Image: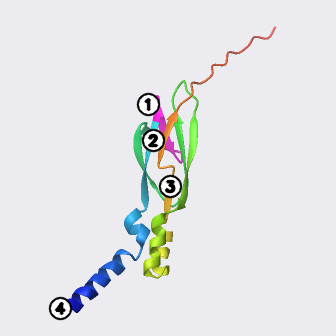
Amino acid sequence: MRRLLIIMTGIIFAIFFSACSTVLNTTTQEIGLKTTPPNAKVTVDGKKFGMSPQQVNVDRGVNHVIKFELEGYETYETQLTRKISFWFWGNILNGFIPGMLVDMFTGSMYNLLPEKIEVELIPAKIVTPTKKR
């Protein structure tokens, strides 16, 4: 009976750690977005995501461009950059190859940075046209 318990525990650990980042990190990441003043239009990779402040859930596998727009203020644009996650190195426990391949194909081997974006929008400068004489 004890031998069966050891075997079952080994199988559970093998399954749990077979794709470490995919299990522990998931394939998407929640990013906090906040602007001062609030209610700026938020777009991620050209797709509208509503108004700030909010949390957006984006794919970990690629970099993303975040844009904030508010009437009377300058547009602010920044990028979420992917970096290799700490959890990806947990694949050492299962012999690298199986877990690393799964994590690479799902994109879960990455973390997006920064995890939270807080922006103070700058009022737009009003340009008055000059009359030519």
Point out residue 42 in the picture as x, y percentages from the top left corner. Answer: 48, 39
What amino acid type is highlighted by mark number 3?
A: Leu
Point out residue 81 in the picture as x, y percentages from the top left corner. Answer: 56, 54
What amino acid type is highlighted by mark number 4?
A: Met
Q: Residue at x 40, y 77 (%)?
A: 18
Q: Which residue is mark 4?
A: 1
Residue 122 lies left or right of residue 57; in this view the side is: right
In magenta segment, residue 75: no
Nearest to N terminus: mark 2 or mark 1: 2
Q: Secondary structure at mark 3?
A: strand
Question: For the stretch drawn in magenta, what is the main secondary structure?
Answer: strand
Point out residue 41 in the picture as x, y percentages from the top left corner. Answer: 47, 35
Nearer the observer: mark 1 or 4; the answer is 4
What amino acid type is highlighted by mark number 1?
A: Pro
Q: Which residue is mark 3?
A: 112
Q: Are dots 2 and 4 in contact, CB under 8 Å?
A: no
Q: Secondary structure at mark 2?
A: strand
In magenta segment, residue 37: yes
**Disc assigned to residue 38:** 1
The alpha-carbon separation of the residues under discs 3 and 1 comes to 23 Å
The alpha-carbon separation of the residues under discs 3 and 4 comes to 46 Å
Residue at the limit of the structure toward the top, as seen here: 133
Residue at the limit of the structure toward the right, as seen here: 133
Nearest to N terminus: mark 2 or mark 3: 2
The alpha-carbon separation of the residues under discs 2 and 4 comes to 53 Å
Mark 2 neighbour density, 10 Å: few (under 14) some (14–19) many (20 or more): some
The alpha-carbon separation of the residues under discs 1 and 4 comes to 62 Å
Q: Which residue is mark 2?
A: 33
Q: Secondary structure at mark 1?
A: loop
The alpha-carbon separation of the residues under discs 2 and 1 comes to 10 Å
